[in-house]
Image (spheres, rainbow, N blue to C red):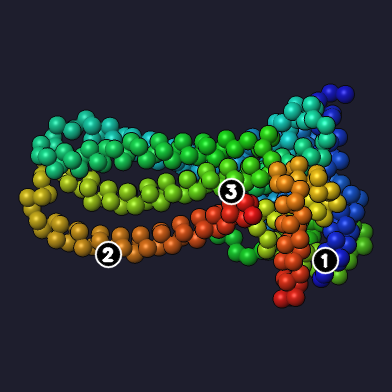
Amino acid sequence: MGKETQFISVIKQYEGVIFKITTIYTDNKNDQQDLYQDIVYQLWKSFDSFRNEAKISTWMYRIALNTALTRIRKKGRQGISISIDKVVLEHTEAYDSQFEERLKLLYKQIGALNALDKGLILLFLEGKKYEEIAEITGLSLSNVGTRLARIKQKLKSQIVKN
Amino acid sequence: MDLDEIKATWSQMSDQLEQQKKLTDKIILEMTQQKYKNKFSKISMYETIGAVVCYVMAFYILLYMKELDTWYLLTLGIFTLGCLLVMPFLVLRSLKNIQRVDLVNSNYKEALIKYTQEKNRLLFLQRLGIYLGFFMLCTSLPVFSKINNGKDLFLSATTWLWYLPVMGVFFFFFARWGYRSYRSITDSAENILNEMDQ
């Protein structure tokens, strides 16, 4: 299989994950699309390095999160205007307004976290084990545990406020 | 929405995303070919244009340096020249450093620390540039007046009588605004760095 074919298959496998990362790190559709492309471009640029690595998901999450993190956001955007709801649901056959509301709330709560915590909660919600989260983020295993406990606490207090 | 609901919603969204895969081979390949539109590229372009303007002005002062025939005009000329040459260089170098953050080999923590530090440095330089630029408005006036018209402004006090107070008041409000904005951005960056160590 050629490099391009392999890359396409990897991106297709992880397109949902990239979408979720772009959603929590941006607050409008244009920025989201820009970031999506940036991430795919960075993954392509470093695809050769992945082929020597053991775990594809670690490589993918690391580069995607780093790209999201080091990207300059346009100034002057106000608040968190969740424009992704339609993007997520427009292609589904059954439109579920309740689910869309829950999704908005979810992004609002995650959007209120800082950059580091956003990455951690995303990895946690993606079902990553603490060991892999530590590997991707460079935090110690105990630090991952402590931080995730704090984030959960933060989210709980946000939930109470709401 | 409690934590279990967050997890459930996330999981439901993941399932839906799995079902509605939209990327085609063509789109993916286009994304790899299209030029990377990093926001820094735009900023770099503006800063490069700014740097060229500064260097042209610096060259102009250098060319007519001999016209600055008193110690104070020469001092102001050298100061202005120094600012015009050094500041754009530092800003462009700082921008380059930000773009050099290694996204591939760094983990999330390393990338965040490096990026935050470089961003702070750039912000500091930009603020410094604004302050110096403002200061330069005062220092360059007599320099260019002497070079262009052969007139020593220090010998005709009337210009300074209105120029300095107006600039002083303007600078006070401008500097206060600049400092506050800078503090709020760097404080939030510092918080992230501090939290990393906890």
Report the front residue among A100 and A134.
A134
SS for callout 3? loop
| Residue for badge 1 | B3
Instruction: Provide residue B73's location: percent of width, then percent of height.
Output: 15, 42
**Discs 3 and 2 carry the same chain letter:** no
> Distance from label 3 to label 2 (Cα)?
33 Å
In-image side of B19 versus A63 (left or right) = right
Chain where mark 1 sits: B
Instruction: Provide residue B40's location: percent of width, then percent of height.
Output: 55, 42
**Discs 1 and 2 carry the same chain letter:** yes
Q: Give residue B80's mark.
A: none
| Residue for badge 3 | A72
Query: Which one is closest to the eye, mark 1 or mark 2?
Result: 1
> Distance from label 1 to label 2 (Cα)?
53 Å
> Distance from label 3 to label 1 (Cα)?
30 Å
**Label 3 Cα neighbours within 10 Å, binned few <14 / some 14-19 / many ≥20:** some
| Residue for badge 2 | B169
Image quadrant where one finds the C terminus of chain B:
bottom right
Which residue corresponds to the image point at 79% horizontal and 26% vertical from the top-left? A52
Asked if marks 3 and 2 touch (Cβ < 8 Å), the reply is no
Which residue corresponds to the image point at 52% horizontal and 37% vertical from the top-left? B97
Chain where mark 3 sits: A
Q: Residue furthest left?
A: B155
Instruction: Provide residue A104's location: percent of width, then percent of height.
Output: 77, 65
